[in-house]
Amino acid sequence: MTDLWTDPEWLAGAQAWVDEQTAALGLERTGDAEQPHVRVWSTVLRVPTTTGPVWFKANHGPLRHEAALVTLLADRVPDRVEPLLAADLDRGWMLMRDAGQRMRELVVVEASLERWHPVLDSVARISIAMEDDVDALLAMGVPDLRLATLPARYAALVEEVDAAPPFRAATGRVAELCERLAAYGIRDSVQHDDLHDGQVFVRAGRHWVVDWGDACVSHPFFVLAVALEGQIAFGLDDVESSVDTGPFRDSFLAPYAAAHPDLSHADLVEASRLATRLGWAARAVNGHLPADPESTRRRLEMFLDGRVGH
């Protein structure tokens, strides 16, 4: 697919579309487009204009639904997910305004993880706002990793990758954890599934969550697997388990506490504990690429033994 993204004819067509959209928006290009991101699954162009850069993104087939997903998210929560400047839903093309400063760099400059608190609160509110849209999300092609479907998806994955016996034997554990988690009554919803500090940008005092290509429909607490254990727990110095993630977890849980007064804090903490472990099984399924078996293996190991293994 990278051959397509760099094909001169494809690039010319993409840039012609960008020019059409910017002209309709009253923007004028001020230089050549740059292509800073070329991956098998997507590419990004940075296009300078009179009012600052705009960004074009195209996804390959399995992720083409991102354009429709972001359009719906921005309709539901425009103060948390940036509305697109333009979209071609059939081709999965998006045109976006510049989102500001990446949180990854700000965390280093500020020597602080405090920005994660409003981000986790925001992500929880996004999932709550999208609970009634599950059918629409599935219809547009967002992957189905709901608690009811995850055990079968996990079983199919370990078969596909010819996983070692411990991973195969864990199929029953996935089903058990799904049943226990379902008992708390938290509804499935959209879940980002790759929430790290490179996916959050800051502009005008707001934290914008971007790159929804890996999003799925699942238990919303699964987002804590990557965010807490895969990122925040490593702190500023990349040392595993060097940060107490409890306060950050609680920032995420606060909107759910308000939405579920029937659940105690202890209930929500236990649900988050189950979901954080189970979230790695979902991440292994949702993020599996045949060309990258090592990432799948690491996620399966994280599900079994609770160590990220950077």
Image (spheres, grey):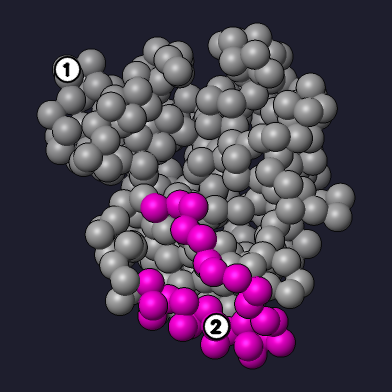
Q: Is residue 7 magenta?
A: no
Q: Is residue 23 magenta?
A: yes
Res. 126 image quadrant: bottom right
- Name the spot of residue 83 as percent of width and height, x first: 67, 70
Q: Amino acid at mark 1?
A: Pro
Residue carrying label 1: 165
- Name the spot of residue 33 as percent of width and height, x first: 53, 67
Give me the residue at 62% from left, 18% from top. 233
Q: CA distance from mark 1 to mark 2?
A: 54 Å
Residue sitting farthest toward the right: 205
- Give the camera-side residue of 169 and 280: 280
Q: What's the magenta region?
A: 11-38
Q: Amino acid at mark 2?
A: Asp
Q: Quadrant of the N terminus?
A: bottom left
Residue carrying label 2: 19
Question: For numbered disc 1, what is the local secondary structure?
Answer: helix
- The answer to whether one can see residue 268 in this image is yes
